[in-house]
Image (cartoon, rainbow, N blue to C red):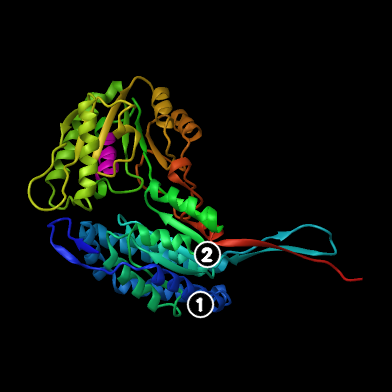
Amino acid sequence: MVISDPRTGEPVGRVRIADQADVAAAVERTRDAFRSWSEVSPAERGVRLRTAASALSAHADELAELNERETGKPRADALGGVLAGVATLEQYAELGPLHTGRTLRGDPSAIDYTVAEPRGVVAVITPWNDPVAVAAGLIGAAVVTGNTVVHKPSERCPHLGELLGRVLGGALPPDVVVTVSGDAGTGAQLVAQPGVSMVAHVGSTAAGERIARAAALTGAHVVRENGGNDALIVDADVDPVWAAEQAALGAFANSGQICTSVERILVHAAIAQPFLSALVAEAEQRTADPLFGPLVDTALRRDVHAQVLEALESGAVALTGAALSEGAGSFYPATVLSGCRPTMTIMREETFGPVAPVQVVDSFDEALRLAADDRYGLAATVLTRSLEHAADAARRLPVGTVKVNAVFGGAPGGSAEPRRASGSGFGYGPGLLDEMTLTKVVHIGVAP
């Protein structure tokens, strides 16, 4: 498996794809390690996870460099992702020992309570767009609750995945975390292993649905955060320039390669023209920025451009961008499309590129209706000065996360469940600790 730098097209290196025997051996090793690791006290597991966080911090620059070389993610953003992974490990090191059961009220002469027990071997399958932060969250929650992990990183950043495995695995007892490198076939082999008790997946909807079907045959518990088609609603009462800044951040950050990127924009007709003008200026400024990174590879660029061309053929208008760049690499310009309609693929499906498709609406109610009419259910954002509109959006939008007046952000400790094609289960936050464990009820009566 050869990996190329998406900025230059030059090879980064070659990684061997794990075969069926490698995958089976990895699962068996982690099953053996589970017997002793699950008996370690939660407090000690927290200490070991904190050591892993320190090790990750010590390798932050090296990991960020590999991330940039394999995926094109700008170095500063890549380093931020590593440091976010460090913070997540530290958070779970604190939360894990506090993950307790409950006392139940029954017969006054008896004792009833619940205990959270680890599931066993967790298969963690992670994406390339934020590879360290996502992996750290899933791995950290798994190991601090007493599980062991087989991690399959994305085939688009395998060198980074293998280094991450060495860093985290070296800070934990042997075989608590084992890494297998490979492609989609490797992931399928891992999910199908009978010794896997749980699968935690972040990635495309197509992959997540295949995982869910495979796990139905093995009985493994599945948590997955998959694709999104996140809407941004721009109300009539907001500053259009500020709204354009928010839209550009949501649509163009990391070149649009974020799970919760803004994928479609519904702007009120009253401010549509100044909003579009400001958004075009934002897009052109980002495209000209030397730090504006490429798409992860030419295959993704081809898919993004195909959606843009289909929209143009269906009546959309490119106000800026929408053209393949010349030269090496897989760069794609920040693109603004106006005149978009709900039937266009670019408004119906996740694009995963720096494209801002805009549809003008006549009312906030129309925007809410269009935003809700979607097969995905990851997140949505509303920009409004109206408390009534904000409350209405929070109630009516069928997504896991509703953001008001900020396309990114949120308080620590939040946990949300994606809906429909976007996945299922708590994939982060304290709720992920619940996913990683099984609840046992204990009843202790009094012998006569």
218 or 62, which is in the foreground?
218
55 or 341, which is in the foreground?
341
Instruction: Give me the disc on residue 20.
Output: none
* Mark 2 residue crowding within 10 angstroms, few (<14) / some (14–19) / many (20+): some
Tag 2 residue: 194
Q: Residue at x 80, y 57 (%)?
A: 106
Lower position in the chain sequence, tag 1 or tag 2: 1
Q: Secondary structure at mark 2?
A: loop
Tag 1 residue: 33
Where residue 210 sits in the image (x, y, percent)?
A: 43, 50
Q: Which residues are magenta?
A: 242-252
447 or 83, which is in the foreground?
447
* Mark 1 residue crowding within 10 angstroms, few (<14) / some (14–19) / many (20+): many
Pick out the residue farthest to the top.
Answer: 362
Classify the position of the N terminus by image quarter.
bottom left
Where residue 266 sits in the image (x, y, percent)?
A: 33, 29
